[in-house]
Image (tube, rainbow, N blue to C red):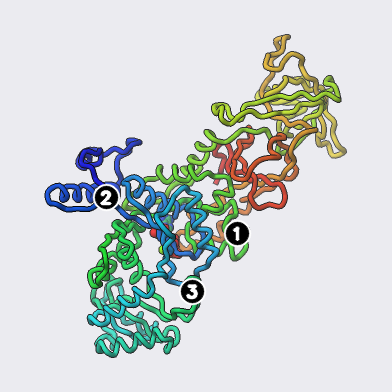
Amino acid sequence: MTVDSTSTHADSVDKPQATADSRPLHFLEQIIQKDIDQYTAAQQSSDQQGDYKIVTRFPPEPNGYLHIGHAKSICLNFGLAEKFNGICHLRFDDTNPAKEDQEYIDAILNDVEWLGYEWEGEVRFASSYFQQLHDWAVHLIEQGNAYVCHLTADEAREYRGTLTEAGKNSPYRERSVAENVAEFAKMRQGEYDEGVCVLRAKIDMSSPNINMRDPIMYRIRKQDHHQTGDEWCIYPNYDFAHGQEDAIEGITHSICTLEFADHRPLYEWFTEHLPVPSRPKQYEFGRLNLNYTVTSKRKLKQLVDEGYVDGWDDPRMPTIAGLRRRGVSAAAIRKFCEMIGVTKSDGVVDVGMLEHAIRDDLDKNAPRAMCVLNPLKVVLTNYPEDKTEVMTAAGHPNRDDLGERILPFSQQIYIDQDDFREEANKKYKRLVVGKRVRLRNAYVIEADSCIKDDSGNIIEVHARVIEGTLGNNPEDGIKPKGVIQWVDSKQHATFDTALYDRLFTDESPDSGDKNFLDTINPNSVEKKLACIGEIGLLDAPIGVTYQFEREGYFCKDSHAETFLFNRTIGLRDTFVG
Ligand code: ATP
Ligand code: MG
């Protein structure tokens, strides 16, 4: 990016900092702004040439689907690049073939794109740097900074020490360079079984930071890799891989979650001791934790593998794929990530905030439709049997671009069972025998009687249309009590609905020694069969979420062979946890 000293960025460092939407810059934005300003100043005082572009990256490990926590990291990394005219890479951190899979790679790419972000250039893979990482490992060995260690896992644990006790040097620590080169070559050639030895960096067994106590760089894993096949039988550890990958790609700001703060000295140690092409810096921010939600890939995988949910994209899952299938828009997720902000400490965000962002987005954007979840037939006894009128209604009350809906109306219609009572007190503003109600977008009707089955359930209502009430109040001055939705009995769509609730009943399902599986909400889904909705819903596209008036937000399921609508969320918060 060419930094222009007259741009608004340049003079904003010490003042209250405002962005376009007038929120103050968060700490990472401030850091980047400062870096840009420093570069600009250096450029002015010397003859420093060249552009300064910030480069961030989103580095998922393809060992599961992305969840709402990852969305925060995606919005942050891509968002910073966007805001500061930089670029963002997408790099799979695929250093552990045992848990990784092509299915996850495909899902992750799809999710990032769906969220609305574009990575710079090709998708990148840590595995494409394996040769370079290997050569750098050899470099460290040759400099006397790494050694092959044959301690068993148990011994290594004992030698490592504890938080309060220094570790002890491994007996293999003083091997000669030549011996280490030879041993590492044997590891690489598959001459040792898994677990027999590892390559360790030679740093400091008495460091107060356990990550610096001769950390493992390479392990033997006789496992094919989804990208490199059987080319390798040794794989680099995260700590030896990540910083070097960043350096190869010229990442300027390597942003990760707080649990990596203690790894930063090691990140820096490796880049300082290696001839890497650039010196990226690591910054940490607080991860997103949501109450009533689990955001650990391992636990989400367990829910899938053990059949507690119907896959990674089950609409109850906090995965991006699950949220999408549930009817949540990418814009709502991005808005939520913006709302929660970016801080240097971990906290728990109320899932109500996510729900608020979802409702707010849908209220503004969801086309409206009428639907009755529990149909009850109403016969309009004074309406001609063979007549059909066509009513119309706005696609959305404030959005002309969402067009007009066509609502056929004939002698028999359906209303919701909850919208009729034989008798009721004054608080009940729906249809009652002897009383009037307005059918939304149509006439006022008055109920005369109802028919019951043998068990006393109301199965049909007889009512009359009050003439002249299309758009007007009744001429006799007796006003309807309320407005209810309805659907024509001849021309309509019939479908099932799935009403979802939170997947966990506990506010912190996996805190302390709780087993998150014990806190699963047994009523997290309720299916309603044969719901009746307005005719236009027959053509409902996948990916559009509707507001079923008075019922909630619903979208057509992207999988079901049956015709199913998923409830994204209710109109108001009704959860009683
Ligand atoms: P694991 O490493 O245990 O498999 P992970 O959730 O860290 O799980 P990664 O694929 O490594 O998964 O994550 C990719 C990026 O997303 C990392 O930079 C990570 O810090 C970030 N990330 C993961 N979970 C969250 C979260 N809850 N909030 C914010 N960022 C997150
Ligand atoms: Mg991780």
Quadrant observed for ligand 1 in the rendered image: bottom left
Sequence-wise first label, 3 or 2 = 2
Rendered residue at 26%/63% (across/down): 278
Residue linked to disc 2: 32
> In the image shown, does 518 or 190 lie closer to the viewer?
190
| Helix, strand or loop at mark 3 | loop
Q: Where is residue 282 in the image (x, y as percent from the top left)?
A: 29, 60
> In the image shown, does 295 or 3 lie closer to the viewer?
3
Rendered residue at 75%/28% (across/down): 408
Query: How many C-alpha atoms fall within 10 Å of the one at disc 3: few (<14), some, or many (≥20)?
Result: many
Amino acid under disc 1: Gly
Residue linked to disc 3: 225
Residue linked to disc 1: 311
Determine whether, in the image, residue 553 is placed left or right of residue 171: right
Q: Give the answer, above or below, for where 264 lies relative to 468.
A: below
In 3D space, how far apart are the residues under numbered discs 1 and 2 (Cα atoms)? 39 Å
Amino acid under disc 3: His
